[in-house]
Image (cartoon, rainbow, N blue to C red):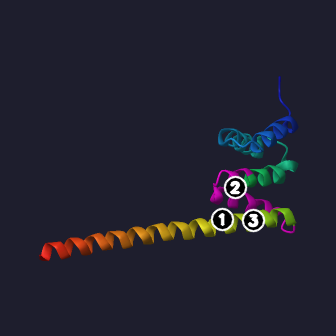
């Protein structure tokens, strides 16, 4: 038989509450499908939970895209604003960590080149 959008929503919600990434990913896939085929009036809920699930998966850019779509429809929603703030903080932290790693690698490579040049002069 046909499974109702409400049942699919509840199933996806249960999946994203799991501690296992594979379950969360299945929930994300279900919510993405619901965004296009489910109840149009519930689309904002789908987007919110998609953002939440992607945050749990550390897919911060995808999470940010979802929460921005949600906030474009309901800009005063405090819960969504809070999630948006959390996602932005994670993106900033991840970006700084990435820059630190690149900077550290550049220093290490520079050091190796310096050592190599010093040895070559001897």
- Residue at 80% over, 67% down: 81
Residue 11: quadrant of the picture = top right
Residue 74: quadrant of the picture = bottom right
Q: Secondary structure at mark 2?
A: helix
Q: Is residue 58 magenta?
A: yes
Rendered position, 4 above or below 86: above
- Residue at 50% over, 70% down: 99
Residue range highlighted in magenta: 53-76
Residue 118, given in percent of the width and then of the height, sits at 19, 76
The residue that mark 2 highlights is 55
The residue that mark 1 highlights is 90
Q: Report the side of 27 relative to 7 (left or right).
A: left
Q: Report the side of 115 relative to 11 (left or right).
A: left
Rendered position, 12 above or below 70: above
The residue that mark 3 highlights is 84
How would you classify the magenta stretch by its main secondary structure? helix
Which residue is more in the foreground, 110 or 33? Answer: 110
- The earlier-in-sequence mark between 3 and 2 is 2
**Picture mark count:** 3
Callouts 3 and 1 close, C-beta under 8 Å: no
- The earlier-in-sequence mark between 2 and 1 is 2
- Residue at 73% over, 41% down: 27
Q: Secondary structure at mark 1?
A: helix
Checking the image for residue 43, the label placed there is: none
Callouts 2 and 1 close, C-beta under 8 Å: yes
């Amino acid at each position: 038989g046909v499974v109702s959008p409400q049942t699919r929503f509840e199933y996806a919600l249960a999946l994203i509450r799991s501690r296992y990434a594979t379950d969360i990913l299945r929930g994300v896939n279900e919510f993405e499908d619901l965004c296009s085929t489910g109840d149009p009036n519930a689309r904002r809920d789908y987007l919110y939970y998609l953002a939440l699930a992607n945050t749990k998966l550390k897919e911060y850019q995808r999470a940010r895209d979802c929460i921005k779509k949600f906030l474009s429809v309901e800009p005063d929603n405090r819960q969504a604003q809070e999630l948006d703030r959390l996602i932005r903080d994670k993106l900033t932290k991840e970006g700084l960590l990435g820059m630190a790693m690149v900077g550290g690698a550049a220093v290490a490579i520079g050091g190796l080149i310096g050592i190599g040049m010093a040895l070559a002069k001897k």
